[in-house]
Image (spheres, helix red, strand yellow):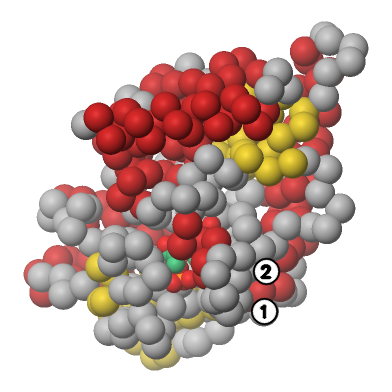
Amino acid sequence: TWTMVNIVDEQLERIRAQVGDKRAICALSGGVDSAVAGALMQRAIGDRLTCVFVDHGLLRKGEAEQVEKDFVAATGARLKVVDAQERFLGALAGVTDPEEKRKIIGREFIRVFEQAAREVVAESGEADTEVEFLVQGTLYPDVVESGGGTGAANIKSHHNVGGLPDDLQFSLVEPLRELFKDEVRRVGEELGLPPELVWRQPFPGPGLGIRIIGEVTRERLDILREADAIAREELSRAGLDRDIWQCPVVLLADVRSVGVQGDGRTYGHPVVLRPVSSEDAMTADWSRLPYDVLATISNRITNEVREVNRVALDVTSKPPGTIEWE
Ligand code: XMP
């Protein structure tokens, strides 16, 4: 529609005005917001943008592959993939506090971006160039909920707004800062991003790290990644992707309960399904998913993920519950 074209044109103009002839790097998370921010930037400044995708080990199954294939194919953007799993998991060892996790993840992200920026400069072959800008896919609701908007309390320091270190060496470009998610999706379509990317469930920057209640370890991440992939696959199969906002799967890693799987007693972990419906994530209601879909998800998770012997359903709206458990 002409209004979308206007929004896109206006954003392109603003980006060009802010960035001038300097270089920028864009942090891709695998989610919709950063993909749309990256696509906008690519259109605005072309190869002076390098997208950086950090594999911090907290990703969903298939995420890295999707960014490497679909995003690059749709935008032609220059992409750098950094394997930083050891670094992030090392920094998160022993940490259980949600805000502490966010701070650590935000800090490690920035360190990785700084390194990536140095590499971009080295690879450019230009002596006097530098990367001045860091692009973030911050949306209006993120700004409000991190206390950056009009008078809201700091509910969670969404790391792409609140959790950045004080000694940040980049200026921020946040081309989506005034938009809501539905507008972002329409901008994404306008820019030619594929539907699988545009209609993905929102995924937080700190990834599965804030969906493990307790310490984040490689083994726990593997368990959660499998359970999450099953839930997403079944929701897609049932055609529910556009009806629900997102459905976090949460691993209660320090809780155990007795079960019987195969022909033996088990003492495994519960996962919680958190399907929500929402317009903008600022408020949400729990989604009334069909029982047969819930049954299939539950059966498959407990059959296919050995360490999980119980699946629970979160029936809390936001407020009082937030969407993510941490
Ligand atoms: P909450 O849990 O605050 O989530 O109701 C609202 C929306 O924000 C996402 N979320 C995050 N996104 N960094 C992000 O980039 C974060 O730290 C973060 N925490 C929550 C969440 O998935 C939901 O869509």
From what the image shows, is residue 133 above or below residue 177? above
Label 1 SS: loop
Residue annotated with mark 1: 97
Answer whether labels 2 and 1 touch (C-beta < 8 Å): yes
Q: Residues within 10 Å of mark 2 (few under 14, many from 20)?
A: many
Compared with residue 66, is residue 297 higher up or lower down, i.e. above or below?
below
Q: Position of residue 67 (x, y in %)?
A: 47, 33
Can residue 222 be seen from the camera position used here? no
**Residue at (48% x, 17% y) in the render:** 76
Lateral position of residue 129 relative to residue 188, left or right: right
Res. 310 mark: none
- Label 2 element class: helix
Who's the residue at 51% across and 61% down the image? Answer: 142
Left or right, residue 225 beside residue 309: right
Inspect this view and state whether residue 10 appears.
yes
Instruction: Kindly identify the amino acid type of the residue bearing the numbered disc 2.
Output: Lys
Question: Is residue 131 depicted above or below 185 in this figure?
Answer: above
